[in-house]
Image (cartoon, coloured by chain):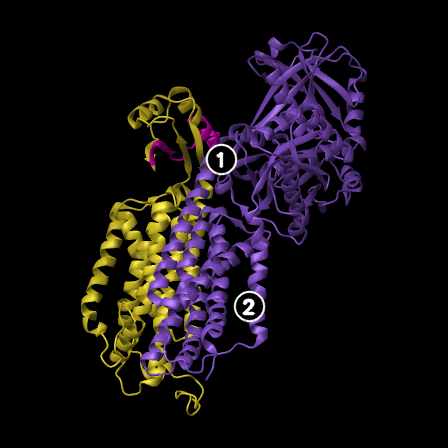
Chain colours: A yellow, B purple
Amino acid sequence: MFLITKVDENNPLRFMSINKWTTALSIILIVASLATVAINKLNWGLDFTGGTLVEVGFSQPADLAELRDVLEANDYGDAVVQNYGTQRDVLVRVPPRGEANAESIGDSLLRILQTNVDEDLQIRRVEFVGPQVGEELAEAGGLALIVAVICILIYVSFRFEWRLALSAVAGLVQDVILILGIFALFQMQVDLTILAALLATIGYSLNDSIVVADRIRENFRIMRKETPVSVIDISLSQTLSRTLVTSLTTLMVLVVLMLFGGQMIFGFAVAMSIGVIVGTYSSIFTRSTIVLALGISREDLMPPEVEKEGEDQDPVL
Amino acid sequence: MLNKFPLWKNLLVLFIVLFGALYALPNLYGEDHAVQISGTRGGEVTMDTLSQVERTLQQAGIPTRGMSYEGGQVLVRLESDDDQLAARELLVSELGNQYVVALNLAPATPSWLAGIGGEPLKLGLDLRGGVHFLMEVDMEEALNKMRESMLDTVRDRLRDARVRYTGVRAEGNDVVVTLRSAEDYQGALSELRNQFEGYETRTDSGANTITLVMTDQFLQETRANAIDQNITILRNRVDELGVAEPLIQRQGQDRIVVELPGIQDTARAKEILGATATLEFRFVDTDNDLQDAIAGRVPFGSRLFNVRGGGQQLLENRVILTGDHIVNANVGYDESNRPQVNITLDSAGGRLMTQATRGNVGRPMATVFIEFLATGETTDEGRIAFERVEEVVSVATIQAVLGSNFRITGVGSIQDAQNLALLLRAGALIAPIQIVEERTVGPSLGAENVRAGMTAIMAGFILVLFFMGIYYRKFGLVANLALLTNLVLIVGVMSMIPGATLTMPGMAGILLTVGMAVDANVIIFERIREELLAGRSPQQAISRGYENAFSTIADANITTLITALILFAVGTGSIKGFAVTLAIGIVTSMFTAIVGTRAIVNLAWGRQKRLTKLSI
C-alpha cells in the first residue's frame, strides 16, 4: 500500500499543539488581507462597475502605445488598453460615461480601431454593462454570498451542532477574506466568474470541514476516555489522507484549467486554487481551533435519543 | 460475509447508465450546416415553399443533405458552410421579403434518436458566439402616452356633449376635470361617470370637480401591455435580422432579454433593435408663414418641427395617423427610379387616412419621425432618462385621396428609404426601450472557447484517472470507470433537460465535478483502508467503508448543492450555466461514486469467500 500519509490512531499527529501558532498566522493573514483590500482596493470588473469592454484580435502583434494614442485622439483618453492572452489580442475597457447612447461606445471603439489601426481586425468580444445593471449585479452577488453562508449555517447546525456549524462558517469567512486579499494584492480583476469561484470555494471548503466534523462527532461518541484535544487530533489524523488526496486532485484539475482553459476561465481557476489551498488549511487548523475554543464536549455530540446497546460494536458474523 | 447487490439493483444501475448514455449519444453525431426558412409579414411556409426551395437549389446545382418541412418552417441541410452561404443568398432573392432565411446549425441526430427526444447539448452564447442584450422598457413614457390619450378622449367627450369645462388636467395617472357650474358638473358627470374601463369616478360636488382614478389593476395591465408590445416588436425586428433561434423573453418587472446566437454584425443588430421610433403623419400648415413662425410668431394650432438634415417646418398640431396603424412598409422605386416607401395601413388607419385627405388633395403632408434617445442622465429614481426627438423625415404632396395603401416619395437615398421602411414595418413602440447590458462573443472566440474547454476537460480528466489508478490501484480503476460514467451522465442529463445550456464556466463546472466526484470515492476508499488497518476482513471492510462514508458524502454534497442553487438563483447567463452543471454533476457523481462503484466492487470482489487482500 502506498500512502500519502496514514497516521496511526494510537499515535496521531498533534495538530492542536501548534494551534497558538496557526491562530496567530490566521489573524495575521486576515488582518493583512483586510488591510490590502482597504488600501489597494479590489479591482472590480466590468460586471460590477459598468462600462464597455471590447476584445479584438489584430492580424499583427499590436503596439499598445499606438493604440492608446489613437484612442486618445478620438476622445477615449480614459480607455484602458492591455494585451489579453497573446500579443495580437487586445482588450480595451472604457469606464461608464454619463452620456447618451452609452451602448454604442463598443461599436464606436471598433470603428475607430478598424479605420485607424487594422481593417481586418477580428471582433472577439464586446461587453456593455449599464451602471444600473452593474450595481444590481454587485448587490445580487453580495447577497448570494451572505445567503449561502446563512443557509449553510442553518443546515450544518441542523445536521451537526451549533459549535461545529459556527466554526465551519468561520472557516468560510476566512477563505473568502484571504482570496479577496490576494486578489487585491495582485490587482486581479473581480468579476462574476470570481463570484462563482468564491461560492464554489465555499462549497468545496465546506466539503472538507464536514468530512472532518463528521469524524469528530463519530470519535467523540466512541472514544470515551480521550480529551477533546486528542479526539480532534485523532480525527484530523484519520481524515488527513483524504483531505490531502482530494485537495490534490482538485488542484490538479484547476491547474489544468489555468493552463488550457483560456483567459476567461483563468481568474476563476486562480481564485479556486487559492480557495482550495486556504480551505484545506482552515479545515485542518482554523475550524478545529475554534471548535475547541467554543468548548465542545462529548455531551454536545451525543445523539438525542438513547443509544442502542451494542451499536458501536461490530455486527456479529 | 459477502457483498452482493440484489439483481434489481444491478439492473437499475445498468438501466440508468444506458439511459444516460443513450441521451448523450446525439452529441457524437455533430451538426449540419443548414438554412432555415420561416414566414414573416403574412408570408406562409407550405409544402409548396419546400418544392420551390428544392427546385431553386437544384437549378443552381447546390447539393443538399436533406430537406424537411416542420412546424411552418423549412430546414435545408447542406454539405458545407460555403454552400450554406450560397444557398442563403439565392433563397433570399428567390423567396422575397415575406420569408426569413436564416443560417443555422442543425443537429445531425439520426431520426430514431431524435424520435425519442434525443438532441445534442445546447451551447451558450459564449461558446457559440452571438449577442445577448438586456433591454429596459421606459414605463414612464408608456403611462405618459396613456395619460395624453385619456385627456384627449375626455375633452372630446365633453365637447361633443357641449359641456363647458374650465380644465381637464392630469394628476399622476388620474384625470381631473374642473367645471364652471353645478349644471355643467351634472352634465359632465352623466357623460363621464363609469364610462371608462380601468378608471373609477370620484366626485367633489362642492368644488365642481370630477376625478377619474386609474385602478391598480389597469396600471398593472398597462405595464404588462407595454412589455408585451415591445416583445412583439422586438420579435418582428429580430425576424428582420434573420436569426435562427432567437430568444426574447421578459425578465423581471420591466426588462426584456434578447439573445441572438450566431449573429455577426452586432452593430446593425443593435441599430435595429435599439432604435425606438414612432411615426406620425401631420399636415403642413400652409395658411401661415413659416418665416413668421421661426421669428417667434407661432400660430395657434401649429408647431415648429426640425427637419432632418436642417431647416424647420410648421406643422399642424393635429396628428392624422400614428405609427401603430402601419401594417407593412417596403422600399420600391417611383417612375423616375427614385427610392420610395410603400406603406400599408390597417383598416382603421385607412379610414382615418381617407377622411383626412379627402378635402386636402394638393396639400403637403409631413412624416414625423420620433425617436427616444437616452440623454445619458438618470432620473430621480435612478432610471435612464429619455429625450423625445422629433424630426420631419419627409414632406410629400398628397396627390389623391389616400386609402390603406399609399407611398411616400422623396425620402432621400436608398439607404434612408430602407431604414425608414424597416422602422415603419417594425411598428410604433408604446414605450421606448434602452439597452442596459450587452454581451457579444464573436464566432472565433466561441470556437476557441470550446476548444480550450475540451482540452482542459480531457487533460484534467486524464491526470485524475492516472492519479487514481496509481494511488488506489484496482479500486482506483473502479473509481475511474465511475468517473467516465459520470461524465457521460452529465452530458446525457444536460442534453435531456430543455433549459440547460453548456457555457464556458459550465465546462469549468464539469471539470470541477470531476475533481470533486473522486472525493466521494476517496472518502470511501480511505475508510476501507482504515477498516483494513483496524484488522477487519476485506469483505467487512468494503461493507463498512461504504456504509460509514455514506452520510459524510451526502452531507458534503448537499451543502455544495445549496451553493449551486444559490448561484443559479442570482447568477446570469454563463454563471447560471456553471450552477446547472455543478448541480447536475453533484447528483450524478453521488450516484456513480456510491452506487455505481459499489455495484462493480460487489461484482468483482463481493462473491469471493476467501478474499484475503484488497488491491486498494
Residue at 21% across, 66% down? A22
Quadrant of the frame with the C terminus of chain B: bottom left
Q: Is residue A116 visible?
A: yes
Q: Residues within 10 Å of mark 1 (few under 14, many from 20)?
A: many
How far across and down, in percent of the image, does residue B502 sit?
51, 48
Q: Chain of mark 2?
A: B
Query: Relative to the observer, which residue lies in front, B197 or B590?
Result: B590
Q: Is residue A190 visible?
A: no
Q: Is residue B549 left or right of residue B30?
A: left
How far across and down, in percent of the image, does residue B83 sit?
60, 29
Q: Chain of mark 1?
A: B
Residue at 33% across, 68% down? A242
Q: What's under tag 2, amino acid-wise? A: Val
Q: Which residue is mark 2?
A: B13
How far across and down, in percent of the image, does residue B598 sit?
47, 72
Which residue is farthest bottom?
Answer: A309
Of circles 1 and 2, the one toward us is 2
Callout 1: SS: helix
Residue at 43% across, 84% down? A304
Q: What's under tag 1, amino acid-wise? A: Pro
Query: Relative to the observer, which residue lies in front, B491 or B608?
Result: B608
Q: Which residue is mark 1?
A: B443
- Residue B368's image quarter? top right
Q: Earlier in the sequence, mark 1 or mark 2?
A: 2
**Same subunit under labels 1 and 2?**
yes
What is the magenta range? A86-109
Q: Is residue B261 above or below residue A217?
A: above
Q: Are marks 1 and 2 in contact (CB under 8 Å)?
A: no
Residue at 42% across, 62% down? B480
What's the CA distance linking mark 1 and mark 2? 40 Å
